[in-house]
Amino acid sequence: MTEIAQVWGAAPSTRFDEIARKYRPIFAEIRQGTVARDLERHLPSVEYDQLRAAGFSRLRLPQSLGGDGLTLPELFGLLIELAEADPNLTNAYRSHFGFTEDLLNAPESAWRNHWFSLLARGQTIGSGFSEIGNAPLGSYSTQLIRDGDHWLLNGQKFYTTGSLYADWITLGAVDGDGQPIGALVPTRAPGVDILDDWDGFGQALTASGTAHFTDVRITDDLIKPSALRFSYAGGFFQLVHLASLAGIGRAAAGDLSRHVAERRRVYARSNAAVPGDDPQILQVVGRVRSAAYAAGAIVLKAAEALQRAHEANKGTDSLAIGQANRDADLEVSQSVTVVSTLILEATTLLFDALGASAARRIHGLDRHWRNARTITSHNPRIYHDRVVGDFAVNGHAPPQQGGVGIHPGREISKA
């Protein structure tokens, strides 16, 4: 990396660059093929496994288990760098790092130690919580029913991000009494069928399609001790999206700078003999880069709040734990609209500094906006704004329930 490419602010820690050094060559290699993969819809399975082999999936595992033992700000610093190379991969690892966080916040148990050992061997986790159709809000249509000495899983999930690449799917279902239950499912078990049918115009290579489960046999050791996630899960998962946006901003800024530096043709109304000397063009480049800088700084600051929540959870002061988790949720919500707006505007603005040739698909510049818009649509920023405003005016803490579904008070048409 050139010195100019590194001016994104101070690293999250003094050791960060040393840790990042072993991953940056892989990021650079991934970046080289990003446009081609996007144009050809070629899933980054090889790249996912490259990261896994290098230890990327173990970033948050304690060093005693062979991990890097990163703090959350350090983790998010690396997620931004990966997203700069390819935000599809950041999203593909999102559920894996969420499950790792579940374990780090869980009480000591044989179950926890077993899954730590699997993660230490490089096994990875995909997502299986979201459902489309008539799934009720706060619950699931997918069922996990006791059948003798085992369980049978039946249902369908969508947005199964990363599951095609992973060894396991972490999912939510309801048991025979309609109560929530969590489980880990081998992605290659009989009765599991994962499809690459996500057809969104952005983040197309995250493997976020459908997973069908038909009489999948689940043993007791695969049932989670609790269906609940770690206490700052809402903020954590949202901040992964914001890290992806910050990385997209950096990639857009880098692409724009290179295109402007290489351009020789100018418009009749331009202010210089080459675009790289035109003050109006340079202003656009500066605005795009500044947006990426601000987005990254905001993400790392919010990650500090998540780290405080994680540390508080190790204690016994319930008041301090509750406040740290509330504050983390609010800090992330306060970041959502700002980061989203910065990067959506930047990925549109960059075209003002270029010509019509920048719209050619071979350059792949449109992917930045498509990816940013898709990520921003995952969790509408209007609700984060309202939550922040409600806290500022009325002192109300953010609601803890997450997810999407049919409201229980709404009658579903049978037609």
Image: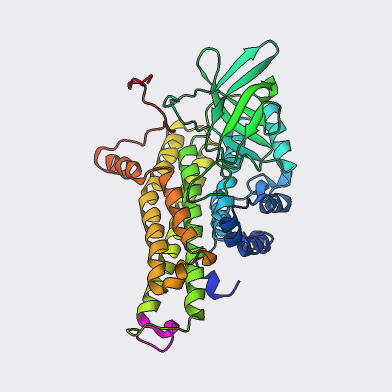
Indicate whether 261 appears above or below 108: below
Indicate whether 354 appears above or below 120: below
Whether residue 266 sits left or right of residue 78 in the image: it is: left
The quadrant of the image that shows the N terminus is bottom right
Q: Is residue 259 visible?
A: yes
Whether residue 377 sits left or right of residue 53 in the image: it is: left
**Residue placed farthest to the left in the image?**
393
Q: Position of residue 165 (x, y in %)?
A: 66, 43
**Residue placed farthest to the bottom in the image?**
273
**Front-lying residue, 344 or 305:** 344
Residue at (38, 45) in percent of width and height: 333
| Residue extent of the magenta highlight | 271-279
Q: Is residue 109 visible?
A: no
Whether residue 269 sits left or right of residue 126 in the image: it is: left
Q: Position of residue 144 (x, y in %)?
A: 59, 19
Whether residue 83 sits left or right of residue 28 in the image: it is: left
Residue at (69, 23) in percent of width and height: 221
Residue at (50, 42) in percent of width and height: 237
**In which image quadrant can residue 274 be found?**
bottom left
Indicate whether 18 appears above or below 138: below
